[in-house]
Image (cartoon, rainbow, N blue to C red):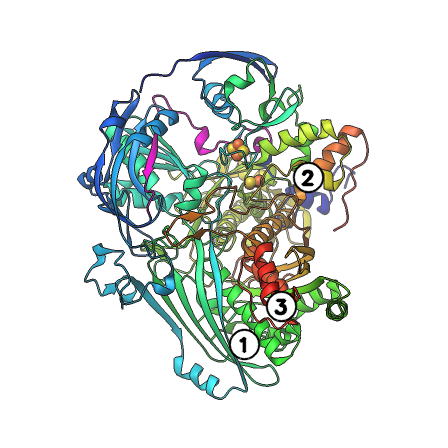
Amino acid sequence: MNDMTPTREQREAALEGMGCKRKRVEDIRFTQGKGQYVDDLKLPGMVFGDFVRSPYAHAKITKIDATEALKIPGVIAVLTAEDLKGVNLAWMPTLAGDVQMVLADGKVLYQNQEVAFVVAENRYIADDAIQVVEVEYEELPVLTDPFKSMDPDAPVLRPDLEGKTEGAHGPRKHHNHIFTWEVGDKDETAKAFSEADVTIKELISYHRTHPSPLETCQCVASMDKVTGELSVWGTFQAPHVIRTVASLLSTIPEHKIHVIAPDIGGGFGNKVGAYPGYICAIVATIVTGVPVKWVEDRMENLSTTSFARDYHMTAEIAAKNDGTVTGLKVHVLADHGGFDACADPSKWPAGFFNIVTGSYDFPAAHLAVDGVYTNKAPGGVAYRCSFRVTEAAYCIERAMDILAQKLGMDPADLRMKNFVKPEQFPYQSALGWEYDSGDYHTAMQKAMDTLGYRELRAEQKAKQEAFQRGETREIMGIGISFFTEIVGAGPSKNCDILGVAMFDSAEIRVHPTGSVISRMGTKSQGQGHETTWAQIIATEIGIPAADIMVEEGNTDTAPYGLGTYGSRSTPVAGAAIALAARKIRNKAQMIAAHMLEVSEYDLEWDIDGFQVKGNPQARKSMKEIAWAAYHAPPPGMEPGLEAVSYYDPPNMTYPFGAYFCVMDIDVDTGVAKTRRFYALDDCGTRINPMIIEGQVHGGLTEAFAIAMGQEIRYDEMGNVLGASFMDFFLPTAVETPHWETDYTVTPSPHHPIGAKGVGESPNVGGVPAFSNAVNDAFQFLGSTHIQMPHDAWRIWQAAKDLGAHG
Amino acid sequence: MSEIEQVPVSMTVNGKKVQRFVEPRTLLIHFLREELNLTGPHIGCETSHCGACTVEVDGMSVKSCTLFAVQANGAELTTIEGMANADGTLSALQEGFRQMHGLQCGFCTPGMILRAHTLLKETPNPTEEEIRMGISGNLCRCTGYQNIVKAIQYAAAKLNGTDFQEAAE
Ligand code: FES
Ligand code: FES
């Protein structure tokens, strides 16, 4: 061998495949301001649409008069529900089986609801016109408290549902009731409670918040009247689904609709659903024949397009005196706002909330969720979450701490005692899931050792004593969260969106020179798919990632897929990519055998090509094989080197992690300082550790925001409070804590590369860690549960209520 | 409502002189994006909170949604489009953001880099605290800032000709 021949290590490194901290491809354009986001798009003749919105939370509309608006030069049209009725689009179906007004049809159900759509030559003129569209309202009684939704005398919010006793998910028991969803064995659970040594019960609320990506929701719709083709560029996390929905609603055939999701400025669940703005822009371009752009402003974003959480969870645990848990009972009151526009797989009205048994071996459990209407914005999206998993993780992690307190046990020890054991996997949970793999004890022990957990507890005890002696006004909390997520929706047997099974797809084409073009049904919004998808392919087929182009978001060219949310990209599309790549490798093996004049069984794969077993000199690299595939394929074989894979996962994946938060709280100001935050994640096989770490940092920052102050609140009149960046807490670099990350690796046994997905874990696991830290700090003063969000004022209030201010 | 009179405005943007007629109410960010087709600066709020629209005006960091275009009349502006080195390679900051994984969706990045650019002129050798304070007018929803801080440290070291030492986790 001469010196120039690269070593195996060098060949391996040249691929930049799985496990490599590959720098991102996307950054070249993003760091130069050359990303192409929706609002960057400018089409000839393009006009601008904007909404007239309701100042009232609940009112009848008696009149809409656009005369003055239409007099303004540059105003082209003002659309109302009456106009939309002509094309049967005044209402649209939601993903949750409800219907939603596109434009107010006779009444409004929440503040800032869309009432009319103004189309004008530019955004300034549109704004002028909005001010002079006259709308007359007749106010109706407002309902904002979900606990009052089902009062006998509660106002009727949805007259359109009058007499409908059957909803999309079973019987409705009240005019403001949407569904009841029940899982688990009620009798078994009741038995566990009647035999329990110890029980706890607590109302644990997860407040309403919003994903608020830095780029709001927006689109450009353009109808070509000559060809009858509609193009829509939009902030779509699931562009293929949007196209199918657009076709079903507009009756334009699907092949004549071109939906394109260009670069997206963050999604976090906000950009999964279909919103009135999209529908109105589409109708407006059909009516006017010119391209129409719609861009939400921040206030509109925070107050109308989706919210997250608003779950009020009553959790009960039954246990033995030694801490062994025997039963779990949870009832959830779910506030869905004016319409149930929850973005869940169709058969799951409360998402995968039945993961609420968490990481613990509960022999019996029962769950019931009641969804109700209120005069608030519609939605219930999965904000960096796999469909209500964040709520479930918060519920169980808070409840376990409360149980530990009641038992007088250390919360880490209580968790260790009740973890599902490594030998129990695959594990059947009492609420119906099959956990694929896990090693919880190892992860927990590693976290405790790294942090010096016992020493921290000793320090905390000393501080509490000093506090009680009046020597300090600072107290300390240690928040533990050991979460199990359920991601990768999902298997067609139980997951679909409007009837379309939740598979995902990949298409890979190796060109004659050995470079690759690949397309997927997913859509990155910052996750870095252009970088990581290429890494999977690189490892699988031995072509350097740098020679692999990844494209997503153009529904004309990409294979059909269900998109990116719920941490499903890696578990579902990641598998499709690996399997498509393996089809290519299999074909390449036959070509190599032909080239080397041996049987394909005499060949073995070696990093970037095939070699004859026992004779590594006789080898063909993938580059050579690619050329042969187009130049001289074996007789009888189709030329080319291309594969498509549609992957229907056999199961979900179950990432998990151990998160610890150490917090110091000033009792007199309520200011909480995060001293340390340690996050150990197990997401199975790690594709790009740099990107994983980045995802964890970002998710933890969102968790920090949610736990410590971020909230969409309403007053009794239904006025939305905090719908601007002035009031809505988005942490800056100053407040954001420093993050320590760590990992263990327990591959998924059913995933082709063993990967589980990670994007949402830090949000799911982060919130309970912060909240448990605050709660842990106040426990010694007699507190059991303090509701989130834990901003300084509320912490101060809690301290005061506990008599800590002397 | 009658049509609003247009007024002339001229400025130097990324070294090039530009002149246009605009409505006096036109925000600088809309002027840059829509008149000059400089779509690097982004809009995240239009209420001066997020910093996605940050550009440099006469040596100062400015949220361009806070200014009318006419207020920048006669000024020298730098936007993200003017940040690369003359030979087209990435500047130290741009490179730092890529090397340290200081961006994800990229939406805050042009504003963040422009703010960091001015910050490093004001404070060539900033501490971590000074960096965090210095970019606190710029929100990022994706990264959690930790790697942005490192990106700016990386650039500072490169510009100062010193070695970049990544702090131990
Ligand atoms: S768009 Fe200017 S600060 Fe947000
Ligand atoms: S990278 Fe997405 S907002 Fe900063």
Indicate the quadrant containing the N terminus of chain A: top left, top right, bottom left or bottom right.
top right
Which chain is mark 3 on? A
Residue drawn at the location 60% of the way across and 81% of the way down: A323
Q: Is residue A592 on the magenta stretch?
A: no
- Please state the quadrant of the image where ligand 2 appears: top right
Left or right relative to A461: residue A533: left
Image coordinates for residue B17, horizontal then vertical, percent? 56, 11
Does the image show residue A262? yes
Query: Which numbered marker is on residue A803?
Result: 3
* Amino acid tagged 1: Asp
Residue A755 visible, this angle:
no
Image height of A386 relative to A642, above or below:
below
Which amino acid lies under the numbered mark 3 shown in the image of this protein?
Gly
Determine contact: label 2, label 3, CB under 8 Å. Answer: no
**Which of the two residues, A7 or A250, is positioned nearer the viewer here?**
A250
Q: Quadrant of the C terminus of chain A?
A: bottom right
| Residue A163 in picture, x, y percent from top left | 18, 62
Q: Which residue is mark 1?
A: A361
**Mark-to-mark CA distance, 1 and 2:** 46 Å
| Chain letter belonging to callout 2 | B
The residue type indicated by label 2 comes to Met
The residue under label 2 is: B133
> Left of B43 or right of it: where is B128?
right
Q: Residues within 10 Å of mark 1 (few under 14, many from 20)?
A: many
In front here: A218 or A781? A781
Kindly report the distance in space between the C-alpha atoms of the residues bearing marks 2 and 3.
36 Å
> The disc numbered 1 marks a residue on which chain?
A
